[in-house]
Image (cartoon, rainbow, N blue to C red):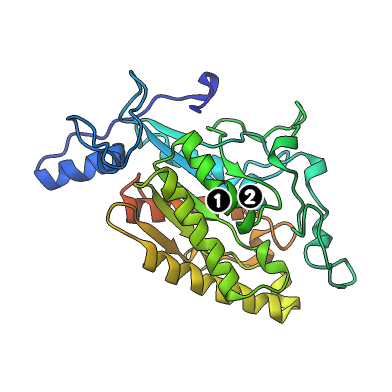
Amino acid sequence: MAPRPAHRRGLTRPAFLTGVLALTLALVGSGLWVFTRPGAGEPDRSDGSEPRPEGQDHAQVRVMLAGDSMTHGADGDRTWRFHLWNHLDPHVEGLDFVGPYSAPAAQDEIIPPELFGGDQDGDELEDGPGGGSADGTQPEEDLDVPDDVTYRDPDFDQDHNARWGRTLADAAGTIEDDVAAHRPDVLCVMIGINDLLHPITAEEMEQRLRAYVNGARDANPQIRILLAEALPIALAEQDEGFALRVYVYNELVRSVAADLTTGRSPVVSFDLAEAEGWDVAADTYDGTHPNDGGEMKIAAGFADALSREFGLGPGYPRPLPIRR
């Protein structure tokens, strides 16, 4: 869904650039659609896809931000989605964040931070609410978001595909329908940490990751996918088994992306923690979830990767205006 008119600002078209190469770069930055859909002639329907509705803007760039609580955010957060939108919006004409949700998490969707892997005394939590996820979740069909749940700053396109407590296993089961319904051109994903809270094999995680990518492609064979490696959380300092699972999972993210990427549907992984110098103590408010500075770092990491890998918008301005 496009952002609400009250918050929508004018879009800036890139200045005229001379030369074929410069023109090509300008088109990439202002309309990724040029490269993710057939050209101005009759659309290519060889993949069996349905025609787009008459009158729909073919210059639109639809981006889905998918994940768990780190992307969903809670009542009163800005979220990193806010920062990414406000960075890209002036540079990307037709930008549209899409997804089945728009609100941050309500209080009853959130489990206290001390339950992330253990209580305040350090005892391991065997099972989290919502089917084993540390931060809990509700089935999508049962969601009833209160009217008073708000963002700290609502000035952005709030649509997303992230749920507090979501696992990669959950997401792999819904992503095909989500992509079919909301038709993203680009899928930005940061997920997997909830699956790793309990013992799981590398083979199981690889199956889930491959199922997720293949599900998205079943709905859109030309989708571009950006996979962030899992960010470190405080639990890794207390639980060596968990820390090892995170390490192995991030290796899988890299190898699966490299194996599944194609020219038609690129899949690219990136190390967000390394790129942004992630510091669990400084960048989170509870050892897991990003604070104001952490939100900005995640947005900057995704913005840089989108620009570098897909030519979507410029890199994020540096230095980041983070206050400590």
Dividing the picture into quadrants, the one containing residue 113 is bottom right
Q: State the residue position of label 1.
A: 296
Left or right of 218, for residue 246: right
Q: Nearer the viewer, residue 263 or 75?
A: 263
Q: Is there a contact, CB below 8 Å, between mark 1 and mark 2?
A: yes
Q: List x then y, in percent, for residue 303.
A: 43, 50
Q: Amino acid at mark 1?
A: Met
**What is the secondary structure assignment of the residue under circle 1?**
helix
Relative to 91, does residue 273 appear above or below in the rendering? below
The crowding category of the residue bearing disc 2, from other C-alpha atoms within 10 Å (few below 14, some 14 to 19, many at least 20), is some
Query: In the drawing, does residue 194 fall left or right of residue 84?
Result: right
Label 1 CA crowd tier, 10 Å (few <14, some 14–19, many 20+):
many
Residue 292's label in the rendered image is 2
Where is residue 51 shown, x and y percent of the image? Answer: 33, 28
Residue lying at 30% horizontally and 49% vertically, measured from the top left: 311
Left or right, residue 56 beside residue 116 = left
The spot of residue 146 in percent (x, y) is 77, 29
Position of residue 20 relative to residue 39, above or below, is below
From the top left corner, tell me how far across and down residue 100 is, in percent: 58, 35
Q: Is residue 54 above or below residue 191?
A: above
State the CA–CA distance, disc 1 to disc 2: 7 Å
Q: Quadrant of residue 257?
A: bottom left
Q: Residue at left 82%, top 63%?
A: 127
User: Total of numbered circles in the picture?
Assistant: 2
Q: Nearer the viewer, residue 11 or 250?
A: 250
Please tell me which residue is depicted at 51% across the width and 19% down the height of the picture.
5
**Residue at 84% from the left image edge and 72% from the top image edge:** 124
- In which quadrant of the rendered image does the C terminus lie? bottom right
The answer to whether residue 75 shows anywhere in this view is yes
Query: At label 2, which amino acid type do we have?
Result: Asp
